[in-house]
Image (cartoon, rainbow, N blue to C red):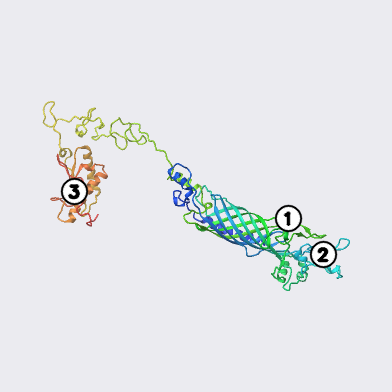
């Protein structure tokens, strides 16, 4: 029967193990959360948050209450059978991530029955006192004779036999230490199952009875309903014949320690020691299912009501072994507690350390030191040249040269030198050619205007009713951008036409805005070099004209749209 019990538990274990591996593993609690830290550990929590202490305070964690059902089996002189009910309740609290303690009460019922007949039962009062069975007797030569022969019976009549049986009811209270075996994990935050080992001490009381009498309180005549051909041969047949012919009264007190041992509630009282193992499967953060197997040891040989061993050639012999009993259970555990994290045996203490290494939040990192050899404000890893002291640079650490004459601005005495006056001397001063018609040496050249330098600029055409630049328009603007780069001192007026309606005014603004944005975003020309001019008369509504600004001419480079909420076609 015990083998069937373990087979059943193994099947349930395999099923729940597959469930536990499929559970989604979540993250642990937030170590910055002060609400889960008890007041007595708040100073450590404060120091930790301030960076003056390396370890976070241990959080307040929930209590576990558990209910369980199962089977109790006695390991003694008589083979055990399945018996119900057995169960218990416990309360458990963690003292760390590995160790916790549990106070547990268990109630159990155990049964057992032999399949071999016994004859040397005379020293067991459950079978030999009045109303039970007579003990075997010996003749003067020491040979065993049956009571029938002793009192004049037929010498061929076989001696009486009995089949030992018992029913034990036990109550146990145990304080247990539990060691969690798998919550410290290096490759995931948490797990959906939990293995643990159990060891504890406690006390138990028990009462054992045997089924020696039938319903009429007469002793059983086992030989009348157990056929001889089944004895010692077919165990199942023997059990069946005993079950069919015996009641379930268990009316006779089994042998016990009597007044020599302490009693509690008129039952035998014994100290106990317990060891066991278990596995729990997380169903949620509040509920888990646990399977356990515990073995309890007491210094007593009468849990099964029998301490005399049959001897083939004499009387019953006293055994020297002690009985123990086993609880195999399955139960539900509930985590209770507000403003508390899960019981610590479900949490991985490495979770905080790994998360802090991966994504630092509380780690004290040293201030980065980024070298800048030339002191231009661009670190060496991004600096493309060693710049002389005091020279302004661009984002790549390259000295600025506004007019592109090869002389950096910090040394250029003529900051903007027209292209036609280049190349320049070491001071950045250009040599402009003599104007047409000048005579003699030393005649001062009259500089050209931006209109002369840039010439006539081509218009930009849009498809009717839209403000999207096509490929031709982009090619035109690339040409204009080249001229602007060659003439850094010049500006361009961007002119849009038509203003007879709100739609025309907004479309004119959109055209001018599209041109300037393209020149700034795509060609890299500064927005300061454009003058925004829209809604003019005398031109094509789908055309934008460009011209070089006259000397002293100025205007805004951006204007608020006249009708921004007007629906328009892109």
Query: Which of the marked residues, 1 or 3, is nearer the chain's N terminus?
Result: 1
**In this picture, is 336 found above or below 434?**
below
CB under 8 Å between discs 1 and 2: no
Q: Residue 385, image x and y in percent? A: 33, 32
- For disc 3, the marked residue is 544
Alpha carbons under labels 2 and 3: distance apart: 131 Å
**In this picture, is 314 found above or below 549?**
below
**In the depicted view, which residue is nearer to us: 456 or 322?**
322
- For disc 1, the marked residue is 321
Query: Which of the marked residues, 2 or 3, is nearer the chain's N terminus?
Result: 2
- For disc 2, the marked residue is 136
**In the depicted view, which residue is nearer to us: 449 or 24?**
24
Classify mark 2: residues with Cα within 10 Å, few (<14), some (14-19) or many (20+). many
Residue at the (17%, 56%) spot, across then down: 502
Query: Which of the marked residues, 1 or 2, is nearer the chain's N terminus?
Result: 2
Quadrant hosting residue 224? bottom right
Tag 3 secondary structure: strand
Classify mark 3: residues with Cα within 10 Å, few (<14), some (14-19) or many (20+). many
Tag 2 secondary structure: loop
Q: Residue 410, image x and y in percent? A: 25, 31
Tag 1 secondary structure: loop
Q: Nearer the viewer, mark 1 or mark 3?
A: 1
């Amino acid at each position: 029967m015990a083998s069937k019990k373990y087979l059943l538990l193994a099947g349930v274990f395999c099923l729940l193990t597959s469930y536990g591996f499929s559970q989604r593993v979540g993250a642990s609690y937030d170590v910055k959360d002060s609400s889960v830290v008890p007041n007595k550990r708040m100073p450590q929590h404060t120091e930790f948050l301030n960076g003056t202490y390396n370890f976070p305070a241990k959080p307040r964690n929930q209590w576990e209450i558990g209910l369980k059902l199962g089977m109790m089996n006695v390991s003694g002189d008589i083979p055990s059978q399945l018996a119900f009910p057995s169960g218990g309740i416990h309360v458990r609290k963690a003292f760390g991530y590995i160790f916790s303690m549990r106070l547990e009460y268990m109630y159990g019922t155990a049964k057992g029955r032999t399949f071999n007949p016994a004859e040397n039962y005379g020293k067991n009062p459950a079978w030999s006192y009045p109303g039970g069975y007579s003990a075997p007797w010996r003749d003067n030569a020491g040979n065993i004779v049956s009571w029938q022969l002793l009192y004049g019976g037929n010498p061929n009549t076989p001696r009486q036999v009995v089949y030992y049986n018992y029913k034990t009811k036990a109550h146990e209270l145990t304080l247990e230490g539990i060691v969690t075996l798998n919550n410290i994990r290096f490759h995931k935050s948490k797990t959906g199952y939990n293995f643990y080992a159990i060891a504890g001490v406690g006390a138990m009381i028990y009462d054992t009875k045997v089924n020696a009498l039938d319903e009429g309180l007469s002793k059983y005549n086992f030989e009348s309903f157990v056929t001889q051909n089944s004895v010692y041969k077919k165990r199942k047949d023997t059990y069946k014949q005993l079950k069919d012919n015996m009641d379930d009264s268990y009316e006779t007190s089994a042998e016990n320690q009597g007044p020599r041992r302490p009693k509690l509630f008129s039952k035998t009282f014994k100290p106990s020691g317990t060891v066991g193992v278990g596995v729990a499967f997380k169903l949620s953060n509040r509920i888990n299912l646990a399977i356990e197997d515990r073995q309890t040891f007491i210094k007593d040989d009468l849990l099964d009501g029998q301490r005399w061993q049959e001897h083939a050639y004499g009387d019953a012999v006293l055994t020297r072994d002690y009985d123990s009993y086993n609880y195999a259970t399955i139960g539900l555990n509930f985590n209770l507690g507000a403003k508390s994290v899960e019981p610590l045996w479900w949490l991985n203490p490495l979770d905080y350390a790994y998360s802090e290494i991966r994504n630092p939040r509380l780690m004290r990192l040293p201030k980065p030191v980024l070298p800048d050899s030339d002191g231009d404000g661009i670190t060496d890893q991004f600096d493309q040249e060693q710049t002389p002291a005091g020279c302004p640079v661009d984002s790549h650490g390259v000295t600025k040269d506004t007019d592109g004459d090869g002389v950096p601005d910090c040394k250029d005495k003529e900051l903007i030198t027209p292209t036609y006056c280049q190349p320049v001397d070491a001071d950045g001063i250009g040599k402009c050619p003599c104007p047409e018609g000048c005579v003699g040496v030393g005649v001062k050249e009259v500089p050209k205007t931006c209109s002369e330098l840039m010439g006539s600029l081509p218009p930009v055409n849009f498809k009717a009713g839209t403000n999207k630049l096509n490929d031709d328009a982009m090619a035109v603007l690339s040409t204009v951008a080249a001229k602007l780069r060659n003439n850094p001192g010049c500006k361009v007026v961007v002119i849009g036409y038509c203003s007879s309606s709100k739609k025309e005014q907004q479309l004119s603004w959109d055209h001018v805005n599209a041109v300037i944005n393209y020149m700034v975003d795509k060609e890299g020309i500064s927005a300061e070099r454009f003058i925004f001019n829209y809604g003019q008369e005398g031109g094509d509504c789908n055309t934008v004209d460009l011209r070089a600004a006259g000397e002293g001419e100025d205007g805004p480079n951006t204007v608020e749209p006249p009708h921004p909420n007007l629906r328009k076609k892109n």
